[in-house]
Amino acid sequence: MSTRQFEQFKREQRLDLFCADILEDNDKMHDLWTVVKMILTLFCGNAAVEGGFSINKELLIDNMTEETIVSQRVVFDVIHAAGMVVSKVEIISKLIASVRVRQANAQYKMALQAKQLQQTEEEAAREPERENQSLILLNNRRN
């Protein structure tokens, strides 16, 4: 390892590859390489998560359901993966018509009904527990 290598480092280079070239095969630097890998992993992991948060924040509108947020994020990710810019995607009448043909509104209503049914079932399942708690409270008050 020489100072010349560090002096020649350019910001355009990947830091992980630069460090690997210097530290990976050097037995004296094994412990340092382990620490550097952990640090680089931590920073890369946080960058991806923080990037996701900023994208989600742009998508959020008050009173959005979780399914809407997830759906919008899926659309965003697909557009991004195709190498396109989301703000420059042209929404033409043919696209809107294709959504109508697929009966998006009917699917939405079915999903809403299924969600309401699930909530009703969950409330019914919690009812015996509520009754038990009420009986316990009454019994405690009597004692």
Image: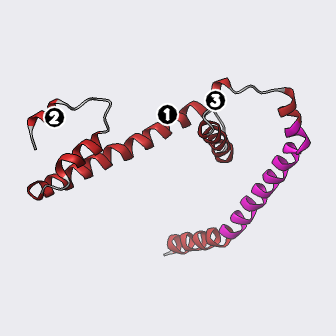
Residue at (49%, 34%) from the top-left corner? 54
Q: Secondary structure at mark 1?
A: helix
Q: Residues within 10 Å of mark 1 (few under 14, many from 20)?
A: few
What residue is disc 3 on? 86
Residue 6 has which mark?
2
Q: Residues within 10 Å of mark 2 (few under 14, many from 20)?
A: few
How far apart, in angstroms, are the residues tagged by discs 1 and 2?
34 Å
Range drawn in magenta: 98-126
Residue at (63%, 29%) from the top-left corner? 86
Name above or below for residue 98 compared with residue 128: above
Q: Position of residue 71 (x, y in %)?
A: 68, 44
Disc on the earlier residue, 2 or 3: 2
Between disc 2 and disc 3, the foreground one is: 2
Identity, as a three-letter code, of the amino acid under mark 2: Phe
Q: Are marks 2 and 3 in contact (CB under 8 Å)?
A: no
Front one among 105 and 55 = 55
What residue is disc 1 on? 54
The quadrant of the image that shows the N terminus is: top left
How far apart, in angstroms, are the residues tagged by discs 1 and 3?
14 Å
Q: Secondary structure at mark 3?
A: helix
